[in-house]
Image (spheres, coloured by chain):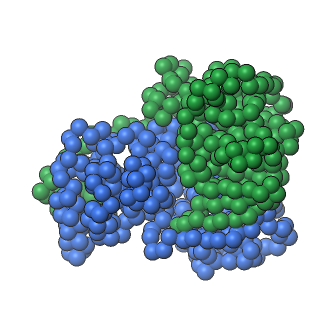
Chain colours: A blue, B green
Amino acid sequence: MVLVYIDQADQQIKKSSLEAMSYGAAIAKQLGCDVAALVLGTVQDNLADLGKNGAQKVFHLKNESLNTLDVKLHSNLIATAAKNANATVVVFAHNINGKAIAPAVAVKLEAGLVTGASSLPNTENGFVVTKTVFSGKAFASIQIDTPIKVIAINQNSFGVVAYENAAAVEEINIPIPAASIKITKVEKVEGEIPLTEASLVVSGGRGLKGPEHWGILLDLAKSLGAATACSRPVSDSDWRPHHEHVGQTGIQIAPNLYIAIGISGAIQHLAGVNRSKTIVVINKDPEAPFFKAADYGVIGDAFEIVPALSAAILKMKSNA
Amino acid sequence: MKILVCISKTPDTTAKIAFTEGNTKFDENGVQWIINPYDEWYALVRAIELKEKDPSAIIHLVTVGSADAEPIIRKALALGGDEAIRIDSNSNDSFYIAKQIAAIAKEGGYEIIFTGKETIDYNSSSIGSMLSALLDMPFVSLANKFDCDGTTATVRREIEGGEETCEVNLPVVISCQKGMAEQRIPNMRGIMAARTKPLKVVSPVEATATTSIKKFDTPAAKSGVKLVDPANMDELVRLLKEEAKVI
């Protein structure tokens, strides 16, 4: 059986988990076996709907104490559920929680692990999964040599596939060990689209000359429904909050569209964004290295181009 | 308080990424090696800051690698580690590496184990989580703030759409990222002192690799940037909608 861990934030199933569900269903089809989802905690979503993303069955360990991440606890419960279900492949989304839990689960299942996977496994001769390495500058094909495999699939690399299943939901009962951490404070950034989950991202660099000029970028993001990001010098100068910093030492993202405004494209910045499907670069310097990594480029003054782009998007949307 | 900092040798962030032997090996030709930035800037420097507050703290460094990792170990010692352990083995398998470090950690009885959030070469972000499972310790990932009173640690970590502060009893494994500490440069005194600090080389414990790299590929080069007239943003919108199909 392929078991897919379905992850939540604020009691809502994350898009990256639905992608993982579809990915797991595709692996099950390839292996000719069953596929089930595993949900820990309480969520507002209708769990039978996971069938629409490929699940045949949903195992649900319903307990509010599991709504926040405790790696020791979660990895124990997931490993036990995987053993009970005789899972041979356990799939995670390679998101904040998946990155933290999957390796511990691999240890408990004595399983080989590939994180940051970017393809379905090749099962013709063994079990080989491709993953991104060197911060998106290369791929490695990795063979997993153990009977049980654990895979964490990159966000935005395997789309959500529509199925017509209605999944049977089964409540499971596993004794829950004592918590290993105590959460004392939660600070959420309200009203923003989380960068790692965003499929559209608008990002600004030093070329915008100062935090007072960010309005045009925010307007563009609003017109698209995009998340906002920035380069390292911008967050280091406190023009924008640190959680917006994308790049080698910030957050690595792989949205469908990345629009870079006034960012020259240093190699450390590219390492955080080069897995984006489409890259648009707006820069007044035609020699900016970022143009070499871009799909579309606009050479000119961002202060004129960005408002014009926002207007063009709104016009397209009102005609649609 | 005993702190173990796991460090890894990685190619410099600007290194050219190429492969040899039929695309099965990383081409080390002309590559500058550095301490993995997350291990150095955040994990190691935070450990040093803790020692500055509590001089009785002891910082041990551990790396799994061959003798060519010694320059980066010496650099880490120059920054401020007390003693280093090199496990003499070369492996790309996270499980194997974690088992090696866990063996050292068990013997050393550390209260805090720091790792970087991931390495910039294999990007697996696995070692911290695996160590916590092997050692049966709590694990807090993506920490950007860490304080400790000797029995309990207060850690702030990144979560989806925000941050969360939690309390956890020692011993604990922590993966570190930006915000934990500020990058430092070793000073001359540190560099001199590092020459005589102990660097112990140990043999690996018995363990089997669970994965093997079959080949590397580099992504297909972008076909070249398509330039759009800055006076015609309708055209850019059309391309994004009809050609790239992303909006």
Q: At x 45% / y 61%, what residue is drawn?
A: A241
- Of residues B108 and A10, the one nearer the viewer is B108
Q: Residue at x 80, y 67 (%)?
A: A179
Q: Position of residue B237 (x, y in %)?
A: 23, 61
Residue A60 location (% of width, % of height)? 72, 73
Does B124 sit left or right of A299 as displayed? right
Name the residue at 79% across, 73% down: A172
Placement of A246 over or under B25, stated as above or below: below
Visible residue check, residue B187 = yes
On the picture, is B32 further left or further right than A256? right
Residue B103 vs residue A240: left or right?
Answer: right
Q: Is residue A108 visible?
A: no
- Tally of marks: 0
Residue B64 placed where, x, y %? 71, 31
Quarter-of-image position of residue A128:
top right
Above or below for B164 versus B193: below
A197 or A286, which lies in front?
A: A286
| Residue at 23% over, 72% down | A314
**Nearest to the observer: residue B127 or residue B145:** B145
> Residue A52: image x %, image y %?
55, 71
Residue furthest left as drawn = B231
Which quadrant is the C terminus of chain B positioned in?
Answer: bottom left
The image quadrant of residue B238 is bottom left
Work out whether residue A34 or residue A96 is closer to the camera in this orientation and state it. Answer: A96
Q: Is residue A49 above or below residue B21?
A: below
